[in-house]
Image (cartoon, helix red, strand yellow):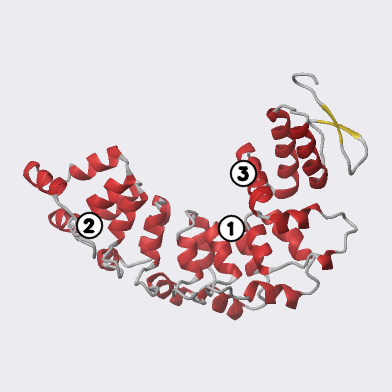
Amino acid sequence: MHDNFIIFSAPKRGGIVQSSGILDLKSLMALNRTCKANMIDKLSIIQLIENEITRDHGKKTLKEAIDFWRWMCRSRPLLKRWLERDDNYDTESIKVTRNMLSDAARYEVMLVKMLRTVQTDSARLQLVSERDLCGLTFLHNVAEWGNTESLNIVLGLYPTEAERVHAVGRQDSLGRTVLHYAATSNNIECIKTVLSIYPECEGKQAVSMQDNDERSVLHCVAWSGNVEAIKFVLSLYPESERLQAVNVQDNNGWTVLHYAAQSANFETFHTILALYPESERLKALGIMDQDGETVLHRFACSNTIESIKAVLSVYSDSERMQAVGMQDLV
């Protein structure tokens, strides 16, 4: 073994390849076992993983490739078995399930390959329309992953505009729509993609819809901490209604400001706080949830010292000590 150049034998291809060459995934898995058994250096294994996963599954960075490899090998044995199959393998013996599709949806290239093995359009549509025990459809899962390409692939399986609108508007057992899940994904493009399905007159209603815990899309997007996404969702409200929207408390007593504080993204938090007139900001920071916790408590839980300092700067000296000394009710 040389330091910078290693030669391997690829079991499936039967040939000799180098670490910069291309292997199919089954060969890569066999090589992984061989590398470990022979204590071959990790860098060479990583180079192989990066090459193969980038080529076959759309990974763009080394970290994505390694994360994918670990995730698949450790926690997705059925998906791993499906990927290991030979080209002439009888795919009927490894039936594609909704859960497998949900896993594959993280990576649009893999999702496309898997959908191709489902024989008919109606069978594909049935798979993505099924609900799990929590009432989630495949679209809920894909929106939560935040993979816009996969989201568009799945939406394209619905043959009509009306069916797409119905699909994104379906609620799970907690009353959350596909838009709620897209809002937690930290991907503004995912939110825009879901909203584009609704007729323009229904978009505002979709954003304002509350789940069973009275959380709106604004609560969800504030929790994600994506400042561009929060600005976009706020822009869907008339300016005169934005303050009222962020002031809505869910069943736990949390406003949108509480969720922004929980995200530990001060820029997102400041965007929401700026909606309040200066005279009302201290009152907004002091709103208690059902456990007696304020926005400052949420920031304290986030462990971001600079953000806590920035929030405390809103208080006067005398009020600051009172705020810091405030205890919750638990």
| Dot 3 crowding, Cα within 10 Å, few <14, some 14–19, many 20+ | few
> Could you tell me if residue 151 is visible in this image?
yes
Residue 67: mark in rendering: 3
Q: Closer to the camera: disc 2 or disc 1?
A: 2
SS state under label 3: helix
Q: Is residue 212 left or right of residue 142?
A: left
Compared with residue 322, is residue 287 higher up or lower down, i.e. above or below?
below
Residue designated by label 1: 148
Q: Is residue 271 left or right of residue 1?
A: left
For the view shown, which residue lies furthest in the front direction? 37
C-alpha gap between disc 3 and disc 1: 19 Å
Residue designated by label 2: 293
Residue kind at label 2, given as amino acid type: Glu
Nearest to N terminus: mark 2 or mark 3: 3
Residue kind at label 1, given as amino acid type: Thr
Residue 170 horizontal/vertical position (percent): 52, 77
- Tell me the residue at 54%/62% (across/down): 143
Residue 330 horizontal/vertical position (percent): 22, 59
